Each structure stands twice: as C-alpha cells, then as structure tokens.
Image (spheres, helix red, strand yellow):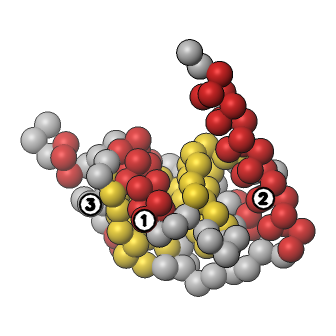
Amino acid sequence: MADDHLNPCASDICRGVLRLFTDLNFAGITEMTLANGRRADVAAIGPKGEITIVEIKSSVADFRSDGKWPEYQPFCDRFYFAVGHAFPHDLIPDDAGLIVADGFGGAVLRHPEATPLAAARRKAVTLRFARLAASRFVQLSAQP
C-alpha cells in the first residue's frame, strides 16, 4: 500500500515509545503482566519512581475492539495511548495521555493528569517490573 509509512505496525510504535522513554530518562519494558492478569504493552519507571503504562493501538479497528484499557489505570501514575501519525487523535479519551510514535521515536502530544499510586501498589508494581527486567536480562545473557 502507498500509505503504509503513515500507519506503522505495533512493533514500530513500541520501538518509538521505548526510544522516547529513554530520551525522557525512563526505563521501559514490553509485555508486562499486571496483578489483574492484564498485560501492558509498555510499562516504564521514571527517575522518581513514577510508573507509566502505554497501550499501543496500530489502527482504529484495534482501538475500537479493545475496551480493557481502563483496567491498566489502577497500576500506574499515568496512562497513555501510543498511536501512529495517521491515527485520529480525537478518538483517544480525554483522561488518557497521547503519544505519537513510529520506529524512529515518539512525541508526547498530551499528558494525562497524574493519579499517584498508593505506596503498597507502587512497591508491588515496581517489584514486578524489576523481576521481569532481571529475568529477561538473564535470558539474554545466557544466549550464545
């Protein structure tokens, strides 16, 4: 298709989000399962311990068919949708942040209002994040 460059796939959006987070001094990981069984596309921890979750939507159909995103919000301080450049921004709910990304990077177009986690929840999410990151590091280190 002639417009494929305008509609990046989910993996390209994910790569751009992770690059954006690196630029913002956040450590990000993909596919983190939360305590409620939902799997966040991207979870990140900022320099002050703030938790961010990003749900990636590569198409309008993907966005419209997915109603589970409110179940991520209790596990983060800020929740964002990440979309490609051609995605209609007016579809994103006002209480969610908006990131536009492609395989080369991303930009935050709208920050959501922060809803700070309770200390016990923050500790649990941070430990889950750390254990997953460490586990993945060990797996990568063990590869020949």
Q: Where on the picture, by quarter, is residue 75?
A: bottom right
Cα gap from disc 3 to disc 2, whole angstroms: 30 Å
Question: Which circle, 3 or 2, is nearer the viewer?
Answer: 2
Question: Which circle, 2 or 1, is nearer the viewer?
Answer: 1
Q: Which mark is residue 85?
A: 3
> Callout 2: helix, strand or loop?
helix
Residue at point 41%, 48% (across, down): 15
Vertical position of residue 45 compared to residue 138: above or below: below
Asked if one can make out residue 39 in the rendered structure from this viewpoint, the answer is no
Residue at point 86%, 74% (across, down): 119
Q: Characterize the local packing of mark 3: few (<14), some (14-19) or many (20 or more) Cα atoms within 10 angstroms.
A: some
Q: Which mark is residue 137?
A: none
Identify the image quadrant of the C terminus.
top right
Which residue is at the far right? 120
User: Which of these two is toward me, 32 or 130?
Assistant: 130
Discs 1, 3 touching: Cβ within 8 Å: no
Asked if one can make out residue 47 in the rendered structure from this viewpoint, the answer is yes
Sequence order check, earlier mark of 2 and 1: 1
Tell me which amino acid carries mark 3: His
Discs 2, 1 touching: Cβ within 8 Å: no
> Callout 3: helix, strand or loop?
loop
Q: Where on the picture, by quarter, is residue 115?
A: bottom right
Q: Position of residue 98 (x, y in %)?
A: 43, 70
Vertical position of residue 141 compared to residue 43: above or below: above
Q: Which residue is mark 2?
A: 125
Discs 3, 2 touching: Cβ within 8 Å: no
Lateral position of residue 48 relative to residue 87, left or right: right
Residue at point 74%, 67% (across, down): 74
Tell me which amino acid carries mark 1: Asp
Q: Which residue is mark 1?
A: 23
Residue at point 80%, 67% (across, down): 122
